[in-house]
Image (tube, rainbow, N blue to C red):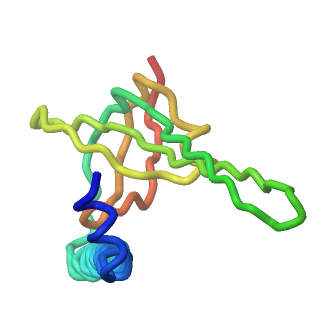
């Protein structure tokens, strides 16, 4: 207990604050760089259209709390939609899709999937099981 008090009294708090702040900023910068890298990779990937089947759908929901001052909280929710497609070779790929596209697709749908890298473009249904 004594060494901890001495550490914080001798500037340790500032060091810890700087380290934590640097870590958070570093993680933010890394996330931005990864996002830009994936966007660039997708742009340079060929646009492919293949026969595929919708085999699974999932949603990822995140909740956010924002303090707006005067003792009030603002709550918001973000939902990300993912669909897993199986192509003729048996390989599967999960792609992020918009809410409308997610709603229009059903497990078991057969059709032509168009994608570019990890970017979902469209799915044209040919028949439904």
Image quarter hosting the C terminus: top left
Q: Is residue 64 left or right of residue 71?
A: left
Indicate the quadrant where residue 57 lies.
Answer: top left
Q: Quadrant of residue 84?
A: top left
Location of residue 83 by image quarter: top left
- Say whether residue 25 is visible: no
Most distant residue in the front direction? 2
Residue 62 can be seen in this image: yes
Farthest residue, direction left = 89
Residue situated in front as seen by the camera: 50 or 96: 96
Taking depth in this image into account, of 13 and 60 the one nearest to the observer is 13
- Residue pictured at 20% horizontal, 38% vertical: 92
In the picture shown, does residue 68 fall above or below 18? above
Q: What residue is at 33 percent from the left and 63 percent from the top?
A: 5
- Residue 109 % position (x, y): 43, 29
What x and y, as percent, mark residue 87?
21, 39
Q: Is residue 86 left or right of residue 57?
A: left
Extreme-top residue of the structure: 129
Q: Nearer the viewer, residue 122 or 93?
A: 93
In this picture, residue 79 sits left or right of residue 31:
right
Residue placed most toward the observer, 50 or 29 = 29
How many discs mark residues in the rendered view?
0
The residue at the point 31 percent across, 81 percent down is 10
Identify the residue shown where x is 24% and y is 35%.
Answer: 86
């Amino acid at each position: 207990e004594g060494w901890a008090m001495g550490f914080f009294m001798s500037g340790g708090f500032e060091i810890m604050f700087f380290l934590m702040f640097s870590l958070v900023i570093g993680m933010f910068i890394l996330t931005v760089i990864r996002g830009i890298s994936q966007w660039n990779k997708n742009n340079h990937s060929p646009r492919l259209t293949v026969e595929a089947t919708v085999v699974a759908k999932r949603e990822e929901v995140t909740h956010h709390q924002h303090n707006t001052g005067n003792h009030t909280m603002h709550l918001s929710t973000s939902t990300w939609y993912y669909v897993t497609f199986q192509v003729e070779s048996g390989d599967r790929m999960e792609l992020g899709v918009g809410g409308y596209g997610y709603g229009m697709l059903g497990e078991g749908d057969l059709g032509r999937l168009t994608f570019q890298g990890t970017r979902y473009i469209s799915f044209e249904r040919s028949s439904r099981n």
